[in-house]
Amino acid sequence: MLILNRMKIIEGNCSLCGEFKKLSFEHVPPAAAFNNSPIFIQGYEHLTDENSYLYGKKKKSNKGFGGYTLCESCNNNTGDWYARDFVEFAIQGMEIIKKKELQYDIKGTYTIKPLNVIKQILTMFMSADKSGHLQSQKDLVEFILNKESIGMPERYKVYLYSTLSPFKRMMGYSIVYDPKLGIQKWSEINFQPFGYFLTEESKPAHEHMCDISTFDSINYDKKLSVEISTAYLSVNSPEIGFYG
Ligand SMILES: [Zn+2]
């Protein structure tokens, strides 16, 4: 629950640690990863509730993509521990994708800190999740909040794809019925140059998504050279897991 008082202090339950505190604006992705200009957001409520006056409209965020989701301590900690390394990853991804314009298979060598990167991606999924489900997964929260901890809970997998689509998804934990795959538990965020896809005991939405879950087994702050091959997927609709 969010409380906005007259001093414009926003309080609520932190999407990461769960404590009821003053919340701060969390950029998803971090501002330096091409997310520092005003943006139009189509949120879930704008798309699905036809009775809402917001249906079909977009709301503008002057700060970029994100929201008041994390307490100051979680925002500052994850910012210090992971955000910089994620930004480096996104910048390298942007350089690689620009050289491979119009190709489906975007292959490149990244020099990154894999554990730091995957923990920032998970922090973004926590921020995007309004259901409270991810926050209630204590082992997942512990994995993010203890920066040295390696090994993500095995029921989770993180997938990556390439995209430059201006259409953005920021979907928290969603239980989806897919005609081919059955009931799937998915979350998805896309923001150029990548899309990020989180599954819980489920399959990825597209067979060519790149599984980067093994980033979870590298020690904190360890830098590695990693070959990553990501499929280029177009995001043109608000529907989670749908491309083309
Ligand atoms: Zn917190």
Image (cartoon, grey):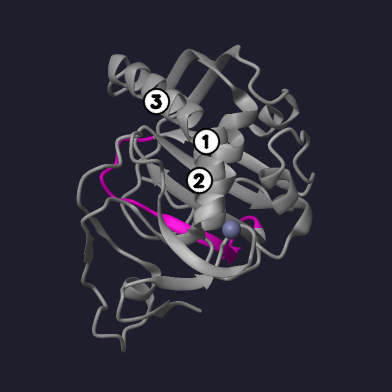
Marker disc for residue 76: 2
Residue drawn at point x = 51 percent, y = 58 percent: 70
Of tags 2 and 3, the one toward the viewer is 2
Toward the front, the furthest residue is 7
Of badges 1 and 3, nearer the viewer stands 1
As helix, strand or loop, the secondary structure at mark 2 comes to helix
- Which amino acid type is shown beneath numbered disc 1? Asp
Q: What is the x, y in percent for residue 196?
A: 50, 42
User: Can residue 44 be seen in this snapshot?
Assistant: yes
Which of pointers 1 and 3 lies earlier in the amino acid sequence? 1
Residue 20 found in image quarter: bottom right
Cβ–Cβ below 8 Å for labels 1 and 3?
no
Q: Does residue 117 belong to the magenta stretch?
A: no
- Residue 186 badge: none
Eyeballing the image, is 174 above or below 201? below
Residue 80, which numbered label?
A: 1
Q: Secondary structure at mark 1?
A: helix
Location of residue 171 in the rendering, given as x and y in whole percent from the top left corner: 47, 59
Q: Observer-nearest residue: 172 or 123?
A: 123
Quadrant assignment, res 46: bottom left
User: Of the residues shown, which amino acid type is indicated by label 2?
Assistant: Asn
Marks 1 and 3 sit apart, C-alpha to C-alpha, by 34 Å
Residue 2: x percent and y percent?
A: 45, 77
Q: Look at the image and give the residue range highlighted in magenta.
A: 163-181
Q: State yes or no: Cβ of the residue under disc 3 lies below 8 Å from any atom of ligand 1.
A: no
Nearest the viewer among 178 and 3 is 3
Residue annotated with mark 3: 104
